[in-house]
Image (cartoon, rainbow, N blue to C red):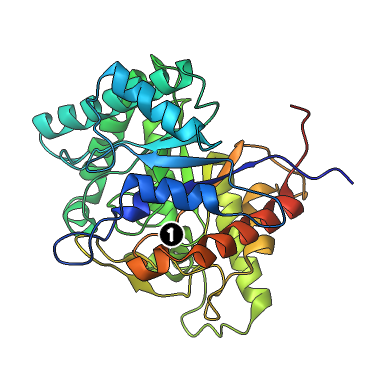
Amino acid sequence: MTQNNYPKLHNATWPGIVGKGPDSEPIISFDTMLESTAAAEVDGVKFDGVDIGLFDPHIDLDMSDDGIKKLAEKVAGLNLNIGSLVAPIWGGPAMGSKEDRALFVEMVRKSCLFGQKLRDLGVRPNGIVRIDSASSVEKWAVDPVGNTKLIAQTFREACDVAADFGEKLAAEGEICWGGMHSWRAMIDTLEQVDRPNIGFQADMSHTFLYLLGYNSPQDRILPKDFDWNDRATLTEALKTLTKALRPWTIDFHVAQNDGTVFGSGSHDKTGRHCLASDPNGKLDIATDAGHWLRDEQGELTKAFRHLCWDGCMFPNEVMTEPKTWNDILSAMVKVREKHGWYEAE
């Protein structure tokens, strides 16, 4: 039997930054994240690439063309590609002032230009540019209707800029972002943006919290007194969630969640990323990924050509342990075995 080679398997580099810093733990360097990714191996299978955050201290968004070329050579030299990029849009909330929103769009423009250069260098065959509203749920809730309109307006302008570079933007499904903090709010925002190059980034951990109604109790799908041993009810809830969001999904993160929220450093509380082997994990990773990767008839959507593992806010001692990355890669391989496909290359 031919082994599936799609979707490609990527690791994220930004967990070396997110949740780190002066009030947490030291940042893990970009090179360390790259080398840890390249070193992982399970039964002869290795990671195919990395998704990267375009922010300091890992990446200088304004680096020269020569710098971008050196970055591409460094990644390619480890037999990796680059996939999705995270635009550093947090300096200008999408529902902020005119100046804030202009800065947001400019950061998207710079990120798309950076991405185009990586494509031209042959190291980025697929992937999107990730955004969020850069706005707190509390501030959004002061005027839900007006603020969602502002976010949608900013996203439209960002989409129009991204289209000039042939890029798609994926809005991150995470409970800490206003206007994106519940599945219904997310769909409302995307529908108001109304652009062909906007989509949804599903993360099996972050998006899982949509089921529990954190920050939006009225949108809860699972019952309040839910028994985690009731696998049938959990499966139906996942089907409800993915039926609503799958048509929008253009980028996907494999992850685990234990049903709780967590934050560290300056990062707001959001869906807790758990290790692939965490005994408290509520997801059957390989099976539950299928709710996102297959349609309601069980057919593969092939909506994206790579998967990424996003595991933020783990202790540094965990992230510098080779077994961590081998376990993660093993979980991703199982997802691809179950929901992937083969293409001649």
Q: Position of residue 65 (x, y in %)?
A: 30, 17
Q: Is residue 228 left or right of residue 207?
A: right
The one nearer the camera, 186 or 40, is 40
Would you call the spot at circle 1 few (<14 residues within 10 Å), some (14-19), or many (20 or more)? many
Residue occupying image coordinates x 73% and y 43%: 300
The one nearer the camera, 175 or 186, is 175
Q: Quadrant of the C terminus?
A: top right
Disc 1 secondary structure class: loop
Q: Which residue is mark 1?
A: 311
Q: Amino acid at mark 1?
A: Gly
Q: Is residue 265 above or below residue 150?
A: below
Residue occupying image coordinates x 77% and y 49%: 297
Residue occupying image coordinates x 55% and y 26%: 125
Q: Is residue 97 left or right of residue 115?
A: left
Q: Is residue 243 left or right of residue 136?
A: right
The one nearer the camera, 143 or 268, is 268
- Rendering quarter of residue 291: bottom right
Q: Position of residue 145 (x, y in %)?
A: 25, 46
Residue occupying image coordinates x 58% and y 70%: 283
Q: Is residue 15 left or right of residue 7?
A: left
Kindly tell me whether residue 223 is visible in this rendering.
Answer: yes
Total marks placed: 1
Q: Position of residue 342 (x, y in %)?
A: 78, 37
The one nearer the camera, 252 or 6, is 6
Kindly tell me whether residue 157 is visible in this rendering.
Answer: no
The single residue placed furthest to the right in the displayed view is 1
Q: Position of residue 77 (x, y in %)?
A: 50, 32
- Rendering quarter of residue 237: bottom right
